[in-house]
Image (spheres, rainbow, N blue to C red):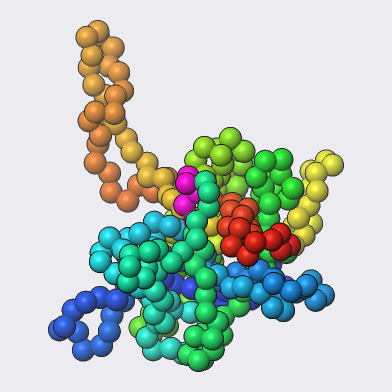
Amino acid sequence: MALLPPEFLNAVVAIEQKVEDASLREPAYVVLGTGFMVIFPTEPEVAGRTVSGRVYLVTARHVLLAALQSGRRVVHLRFNRGSLRNPLEMAIQDAAGNNLWLESKDRNADIVLIPVNTRVLERAGVHVERIGPHKMAEVRGPPRTPVAEGDAVFVVGFPAFIQGISTKRVIVRSGTISCLDSDMIDGAGGFLIESFSFGGSSGAPVFVRPTMESVGETEAITDCILLGIVTQKFQYQEYAPVVGGGKTPTFQPVAPVPLTGENSGISLVVPADFIKEIAERDIGKKCW
């Protein structure tokens, strides 16, 4: 019994940056973040599956900005399947300085889509799955997908501290929806889950864990679907008491106590609705 479809794992890729060091005998790479492939139909679907469509790489915007800030106009993709010794190069900015990714109209949403030339993947012998829009949740505004706080999720990504020599394997972790609030989505560009995120987790897809259980008249989600992507972790910061004019100490954020590795375990997730919004605008029609 599998609660997380294997094809979802094989849609996820590690986004890396090449280490520029002439002393290295072999190319070395560092993980910038995680991404995954999606496909949107340009022709009618057959039996609920997309047979022909436009393919995109989805990730967090700040992952690509980090590459640009280091002077790189390309990133490298390493896949969960295949035996590529070196990852596949992908341009993120052209020679004129134009970014090659697509963004949401909502600037608070830290998410981008990069159109993918599937012929390049085929020539490289890469086999990567793609997630279609029928496997994506819709939670913006009045929730269309019956998910709520307390529902379990899977977080799939490439934490930077787990690296192989020539290949990488996606790591699956569990979590819980902590706060699914429409005002938070509109204001902060996402909602909260309880799941530890680490370097390399940005852009990791979050999937709803299917279940047959529900409470009262609420609807159970019996299918594993894409809920969104991880874009931010929240660090726990403790503050020292500062004595004010009175006798009672007050806590003010002026003298933070240095803490090491204090990950709160709370992460921000951008809903999959933004993926659909960006793809629909690019294709020019509603495609699901």
- The image quadrant of residue 141 is top right
Measured as percent of width and height from the top left, residue 157 is found at 49, 66
Would you say residue 108 sits in the magenta stretch? yes
Decide which of 68, 221 is in the foreground and name it. Answer: 68
The magenta span reads 107-111
Determine the residue positioned at 59% across, 73% down. 55
Q: Main secondary structure of the magenta part?
A: loop
- The image quadrant of residue 161 is bottom left
Would you say residue 283 sits in the magenta stretch? no
Measured as percent of width and height from the top left, residue 109 is found at 50, 49
Determine the residue positioned at 21% across, 77% down. 20
In the picture as drawn, the residue positioned furthest to the left comes out as 23
Measured as percent of width and height from the top left, residue 143 is found at 71, 44
Measured as percent of width and height from the top left, residue 2 is found at 69, 71
Q: Quadrant of the N terminus?
A: bottom right
Q: Is residue 101 visible?
A: yes
